[in-house]
Amino acid sequence: MLTSLGFVLLRQLADGAFHSGEDLAATVGLTRARVSQLLKEAETAGLALERIRGRGYRLLATPDFLSADLIRAALSENVRRNPDIPLLHIEVVDEIASTSTELLKRGQRKDIHAAVLAAEWQTAGRGRRGRKWTAVAGGSLTFSLGWRFDQGAGYLAGLSLAVGVAVIRALEAEGLPGVELKWPNDLIYRHLKVGGILVELNGDALGPSTVVVGVGLNVRMPAIAKRDIDQPVSDLTAVAGRGAGPIDRNRLLARVVAELASAFTAYADTGFPPFAAEWQRRHAYQGKPVKLLLPDGASVKGTVAGVDSTGALVLADGPRRARFLSGEISLRRA
């Protein structure tokens, strides 16, 4: 598990140069043995270190650690292009249990509208249905955004799909085409997962509502980290392709939250229907035969006809149509 002290060491090593154990120990006021232990924990978190006797330690791949100042600077570029983007409040922490859990907790005592909370490392990151979300320090984007809507849960049923559309728009604007959506909330590249979305809502049935949207994106996922994940995954580095330069996570985060803010502003006025056609165009399984695993363990088969105005999945079985609000889909072999 990475700790705040561990991140102090990693930021010292982020220059790519060798640093002796003595110098690192002096920086954080710890023993060399404790420094060695913290760096071993960093390796288990997916960071590659080189050790050379007499020279010390260095990071083999130097991550661009998240910086609230750099994100704000990049966000200002997005605002110049689109002055209608609302003011966003950016906060970055090294380590936290869960950005979404923290924002939901804060929302009980204060307004979290337009609050962005990003973390390098989550000890209890969450996906749908309580699943663990695995991220790599310096190689993932994990953040949550709070937003206030005047409407209630029924109106916001398709919000997670609108979030997917906004994230794809941001990726394409940053030169990362080819990522598709998988109903209801996955981002995939060549049928390998590169990101996920979690939407959690508090409020009255008819509104107003406070929504916390959690987004996780694999930017650089080393092979050792992929082995610990229970499904096939890829990362945005693969999307960029060989020869592409490193992805600037601060710039990418700024672009994504700017697109989300714009999408939320539009959604508040119009709901999901204006997003539906674009979502279906970006759905990897649109028009394909699939099997849908339902929450009760049952399964149904059909061809994806699209989504309706609420974001429900519509499956066709001959002339019959059925809509589903939740479940997990997979391609069905012909």
Image (cartoon, grey):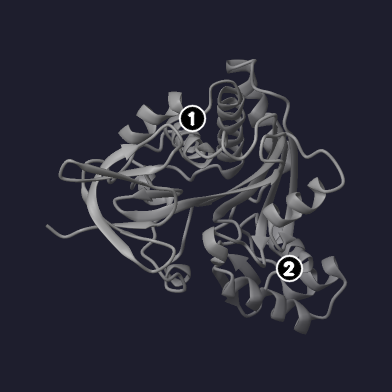
Front residue of 167/283: it is 283
Residue pictured at 71% horizontal, 63% vertical: 97
Picture quarter with the N terminus: bottom right
Q: Mark 2 points at which residue?
A: 6
SS at mark 2 in the image = helix
Picture quarter with the C terminus: bottom left
Front residue of 329/40: it is 329
Q: In the displayed image of the protein, which residue is found farthest to the left?
A: 334
SS at mark 1 in the image = loop
Whole-percent x, y for residue 132 in the image: 56, 67
Residue 243: in sight, yes or no? no
Spatial CA span between label 1 and label 2: 43 Å
Left/right of residue 258 with respect to residue 204 in the rendered view = left
Q: Mark 1 points at which residue?
A: 272
| Circle nearer the N terminus (1, 2) | 2
Question: Mark 2: few, some, or many residues within 10 Å (few <14, many ≥20)?
Answer: many
What type is the residue that disc 2 sits on?
Answer: Gly
Q: Select label 1 or label 2 by which is in front.
A: 1
Whole-percent x, y for residue 17 in the image: 63, 60
